[in-house]
């Protein structure tokens, strides 16, 4: 009973808020007429922001009260314009001395050109009707109470009890339908999801380019200071050997021995340099064996667990391998750890790596460049890094590469769940009953004022209750048909949103 009472309270609150949207609808219509009819375009952005605040409140209440979270569907906000080398700001073919007007134009185009803005407007326009839909059972209950008050006192308990039962029983289902309706109109579109991913990938691409440039500079520095210097020294030594070969064979032999040692050292440095670029064991034997080899070379006691049925692509393996190597280095250098546990596994399309050490903890990506470097490395593959490192340890670092195994596991479209199939079947199979015979036909009989009541249930009720029940039957039938159509559409929308970011997008193919 308490659950039903909470549902009634929430339905009453949401219904009143939806009815109050009539004021915002009027303001929006006036603003649209003034902005697009009279050219007062500066009025539209604040009205659009107010509308987004209202729909944002609905999304929050939809998640907190109705249990269905709805992410924001808007396109990414445009970045501030940058001046050209001559100091002017460009927007299309116009040049401006200040960036204020280009920023305003970009923001205007962002608000007007976003489909989600107009979907919010459609939701706001229909919101009062949804409020009537939510408050209908409570209105029926009120009509029942009024009708019972006008009749004899013996009818009061029965009418009041029937009204309470109708209101309590129908309200949770009306709230669920309201949540689905919000999800249909206010959920993200494939365009907005793809645009957000493109923006994140652009930022990740820039970070990857900077990382590659710094890596090239490191390789050049290592070659110049290491192997190149040793090879130059070997060449000079061999020149000295040529001069001493006839004069002092013993000294020439000693120089040849030094040249051989220098060549061996240069070879070791070159191998280390190649291992830092792409380890041969990673290319030949895969991520699992490469991490095991890395664990054997580490000064820590490392336990490695690998559960991969398929091998990821080479760029993914390289990113995961060097991220694990950086985490091992951090555990030994900064955490003071003695033991490390590495778990590599596949979860559907995602590659998950969990690295745990028994160090002192306190790791924070905001304070260390190592973890930020790992984040930049993983961002190129849409990866996510999570760090749990309380003071005193242990430290657990988890990173997921969500589409690392997407090409290995073909996507399977999930069928419609059984509960939703039942809703669709009941909607198409029984929706006609309250809509036509008990709704529309009963309304015609009520208007004609025919005496023969037949099997029209509403006509057997007291006069004040007949029209509310007829309207309720019509709304119930329409709702059943709407649910039968919207549930499969929403299921297909979720599948499309899940497929909007294929693996080839983040691999840059």
Image (tube, rainbow, N blue to C red):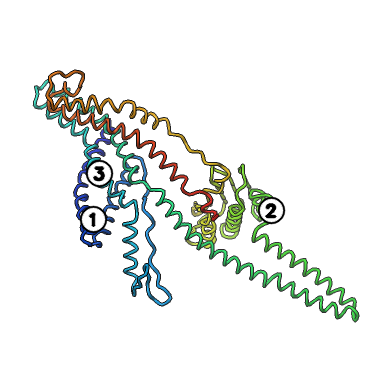
Nearest to N terminus: mark 1 or mark 3: 1
- In the rendered image, which residue does mark 2 sit on? 281
Q: Is residue 398 visible?
A: no
Q: How many marks?
A: 3
Q: CA distance from mark 3 to mark 2?
A: 62 Å
Q: Are marks 3 and 2 in contact (CB under 8 Å)?
A: no
Q: Quadrant of residue 105?
A: bottom left
Please, is residue 72 above or below residue 85 in the view?
above
Which of discs 3 and 2 lies nearer the camera? The answer is 3
| Left/right of residue 178 with respect to residue 420 in the rendered view | left
Q: Is residue 334 above or below residue 495?
A: below
Residue at the spot of label 1: 32
Front-lying residue, 225 or 472: 472
Q: Residues within 10 Å of mark 2 (few under 14, many from 20)?
A: some
Q: Earlier in the sequence, mark 3 or mark 2?
A: 3
Q: Are marks 1 and 2 in contact (CB under 8 Å)?
A: no
Mark 1 element type: helix
Q: Is residue 454 left or right of residue 285?
A: left
| Quarter occupied by residue 451 | top left
| Mark 1 or 2, nearer chain start | 1
Give left or right: position of 236 versus 374: right
Tag 2, which secondary structure? helix
Q: CA distance from mark 1 to mark 3?
A: 18 Å
Q: Which mark is residue 127?
A: 3
**Residue 439 in view here:** yes
Q: Position of residue 208 (x, y in %)?
A: 53, 61
């Amino acid at each position: 009973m308490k659950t039903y009472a909470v549902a009634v309270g929430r339905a009453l609150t949401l219904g009143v808020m939806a009815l109050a949207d009539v004021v915002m609808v009027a303001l929006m219509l006036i603003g649209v007429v003034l902005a697009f009819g009279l050219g007062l375009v500066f009025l539209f952005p604040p009205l659009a922001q107010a509308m987004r605040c209202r729909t944002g409140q609905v999304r929050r209440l939809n998640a907190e009260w109705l249990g269905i979270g709805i992410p924001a569907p808007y396109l990414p906000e445009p970045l501030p314009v940058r001046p050209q080398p001559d100091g002017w700001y460009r927007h299309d073919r116009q040049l401006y001395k200040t960036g204020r007007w280009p920023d305003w134009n970009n923001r205007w185009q962002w608000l007007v050109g976003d489909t989600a803005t107009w979907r919010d407007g459609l939701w706001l326009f229909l919101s009062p009707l949804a409020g009537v839909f939510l408050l209908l059972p409570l209105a029926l209950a009120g009509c029942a109470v009024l009708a019972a008050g006008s009749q004899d006192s013996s009818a009061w308990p029965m009418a009041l009890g029937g009204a309470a039962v109708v209101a309590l029983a129908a309200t949770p289902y009306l709230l669920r339908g309201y949540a689905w309706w919000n999800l249909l109109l206010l959920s993200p579109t494939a365009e907005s999801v793809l645009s957000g991913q493109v923006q994140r990938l652009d930022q990740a691409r820039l970070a990857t380019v900077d990382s590659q440039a710094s890596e090239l500079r490191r390789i050049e520095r290592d070659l110049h200071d290491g192997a190149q210097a040793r090879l130059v020294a070997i060449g000079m030594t061999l020149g000295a050997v040529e001069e001493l070969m006839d004069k002092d064979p013993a000294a020439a032999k000693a120089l040849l021995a030094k040249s051989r040692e220098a060549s061996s050292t240069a070879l070791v440095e070159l191998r280390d340099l190649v291992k830092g670029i792409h380890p041969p064991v990673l290319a030949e034997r895969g991520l699992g064996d490469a991490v095991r080899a890395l664990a054997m070379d580490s000064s820590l006691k490392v336990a490695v667990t690998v559960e991969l049925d398929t091998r990821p692509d080479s760029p993914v393996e390289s990113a995961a391998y060097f991220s694990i190597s950086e985490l091992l280095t951090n555990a030994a250098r900064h955490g003071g750890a003695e033991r490390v546990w590495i778990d590599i596994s596949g979860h559907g399309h995602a590659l998950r790596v969990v690295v745990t050490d028994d160090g002192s903890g306190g790791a924070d990506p905001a304070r260390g460049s190592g973890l930020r470097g790992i984040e930049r490395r993983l961002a190129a593959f849409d990866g996510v890094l999570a760090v749990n490192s309380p003071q005193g340890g242990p430290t657990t670092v988890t990173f997921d590469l969500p589409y690392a195994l997407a090409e290995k596991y073909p996507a399977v479209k999930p069928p419609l769940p059984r509960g939703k199939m039942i809703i669709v079947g009941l909607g198409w199979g029984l929706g006609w009953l309250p809509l036509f015979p008990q709704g529309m036909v009963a309304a015609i009989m009520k208007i004609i004022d025919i005496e023969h009541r037949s099997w029209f249930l509403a006509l057997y009720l007291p006069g004040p209750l007949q029209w509310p029940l007829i309207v309720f039957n019509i709304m119930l039938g329409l709702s059943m048909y709407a649910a039968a159509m919207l549930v499969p559409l929403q299921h297909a929308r979720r599948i499309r949103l899940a497929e909007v970011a294929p693996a080839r997008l983040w691999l840059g193919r």
